Amino acid sequence: MSSPDAAAGGTSPHAVYTERLALRRESAAVLQRRERALSNLRLAVFAVGALALWLVWGPRAITAAWLLVPIGVFVLLVALHDRTIRARATVERAAAFYDRGLARLEDRWAGGGEAGDRFLDSAHLYAADLDLFGRGSLFELLSTARTRMGEDTLAAWLLAPAPAAEILARQAAVTELRPRLDLREDLARLGSEVRAGVDADALREWAAAPAAPVSGAARAVAAALPACLLAAAASWYALGTGAVPLLVVLALEGALAVRLRSRLAPVIRAAERPIRDLALLAQMLERIERETFTSPRLAALRRSLDVEGEPPSRRVARLRRLLELLDARRNQLFAPIAALLLWSTQLALSIAAWRERSGPGVPRWLAAVGEIEALCALASHAFEHPGDPFPEILTTEGPRYEAEGLGHPLLPEADCVRNDLRLGAELRLLVVSGSNMSGKSTWLRTIGTNAVLALAGAPVRARRLAVSPLTIGSSLRILDSLQSGASKFYAEITRIGEIVARARGERPLLFLLDEILNGTNSHDRRIGAEAIVRSLVDRGAVGLVTTHDLALAQIADDLAPRAANVHFEDQLVDGRMRFDYRLRPGVVARSNALALMRAVGLEV
């Protein structure tokens, strides 16, 4: 079991990470010194062995038996040196785990983790707008996964809001995992090669492949023939029965090997790479198996690892031994013996039997490891931000988003200005006006990003947040496309059309529209914007629209009391614009566009 929650006990996460990092670095330094000492000892023993060899073959001062001493010591030192190298690498990975944790706590994490660029889809309704993936993204902040399955699971949670029951189950699991820092460190110790080596698709494909079509009789004959071969050889040597029985058995072995070759060769070819990948996962499985969980989701995941009551790590260990034995056939000295014993045939049959028995469990193991890693990533975030609460998930009818002290989780705490928000059955729309750079777009991203965290089962950057399960749709960062010949305006209305269509779904919609219809004239913009937001509100959606065109503020008056105006202000102080990023009721009274143009030297 892991240590108690240090943060909850009064020690800050920063202090816990700093202390553990110092200890791991100290251990790594000790192991490095031991590694150098063992290397020097190996060199010294080699020199002693060379001297002993000269004394044996030169003046013959000692017997050859004395050579066994330096040889034995050298072999022992090689084993100890290799073990020390592996131990140092493991401790260094643990140190890197805490170093990355401190980087997150000190707001210097951007660019140092897995950005998740492969998950970014420009057609997604909010992934690009809310900075879910890429350098400095929410995924990079959250992800501590060591395997692609963990990364895939975490990305899927960010991209698709979960149902209420699922969110609550994840919250309970994250709460249980939050104090288990030892578990998260141990998973991090397993090494970066796990992510690089494991091909989950290949593993699933291999595990689901049909069994080799070998009859039970053929399996029995294959198992019996090597024993018959040894018996024939022994009888020839001890009883003088001659070579005929031995030759008969050899002929039968050759015929069986030829008959089964076409069926078993694919098993051998297909097994080697997936089995190696599965062997890497065995370390993670073994570590997870040592944990006892009480939350329903984690307990169910732990149970899913067992196959007929046996932990998968044991099964994988047997599979790894089979593979190692199979590799022995490549040894030039052993190859003739392997051929006589039907070595490849026997092991191919054993591997096929393993896959037939344990293969159905492989997808479950992969899914369980991926989900536990994703939950551990959220647990690390919860541990590192003890002031961020879990949101209250509302299951009452109608959409609601009620926040106090809401801030952007990607901003440094010192720079994070917090505001309140209340959207629900009565007030469904806020029209946000304000000057350029006053914080309108950041406020939309703050609302959307915290919604993503809340609906993924993670803590949120707020004093309090109560939210119902929502679908999220945003139009904040729309660009034109030369490849498709689409203008920015056409790309924007296409996205808005998708958002409006999504509002017709069963789950209520949260819409975030930045500078709506900015690419057309004021007349068309006014008519089009009002029609769009009216359609969204009529369909039960809630959301915000930003604008610096004060004419659009009239929309809120037309839709009152279901809509209201709010704004951000700025001040010109000593020729420089100052922003406090505080949300205020009503319409902004002035624009800073001319002041900004003059501030950069334009004569306007």
Image (cartoon, helix red, strand yellow):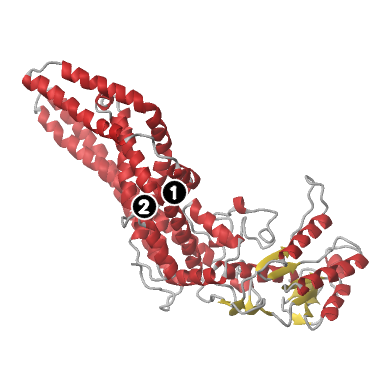
Q: CA distance from mark 1 to mark 2?
A: 10 Å
Quadrant for residue 173, please give it: bottom left
Residue at 30% x, 22% y: name it. Answer: 255
Mark 1 and 2 residues: CB-CB less than 8 Å, in contact?
Answer: yes
Q: Residues within 10 Å of mark 1 (few under 14, many from 20)?
A: some
Residue at 25% x, 19% y: name it. Answer: 251
Q: Is residue 508 shown left or right of residue 457?
A: right
Asked if 279 appears above or below 234 in the picture, the reply is below
Task: Mark 1 or mark 2: name the one nearer the start of the chain.
Answer: 1
Q: Is residue 75 shown left or right of residue 198?
A: left
- Number of the label disc, if any, that sits on residue 480: none
Quadrant for residue 215, please give it: top left
Q: Residues within 10 Å of mark 2 (few under 14, many from 20)?
A: some
Amino acid of disc 2: Gln
Task: Give the camera-side residue of 249 and 484.
Answer: 249
Residue receiving disc 1? 194
Instruction: Assign a secondary structure to mark 1.
Output: helix
Residue receiving disc 2? 283
Q: Is residue 136 shown left or right of residue 259?
A: right
Task: Give the camera-side residue of 37 and 343.
Answer: 343
Residue at 47% x, 46% y: name it. Answer: 204
Image coords of residue 205 (percent x, y): 47, 43
Instruction: Assign a secondary structure to mark 2.
Output: helix
- Does residue 588 appear anywhere in the picture? no
Asked if 585 appears above or below 93 in the picture, the reply is below
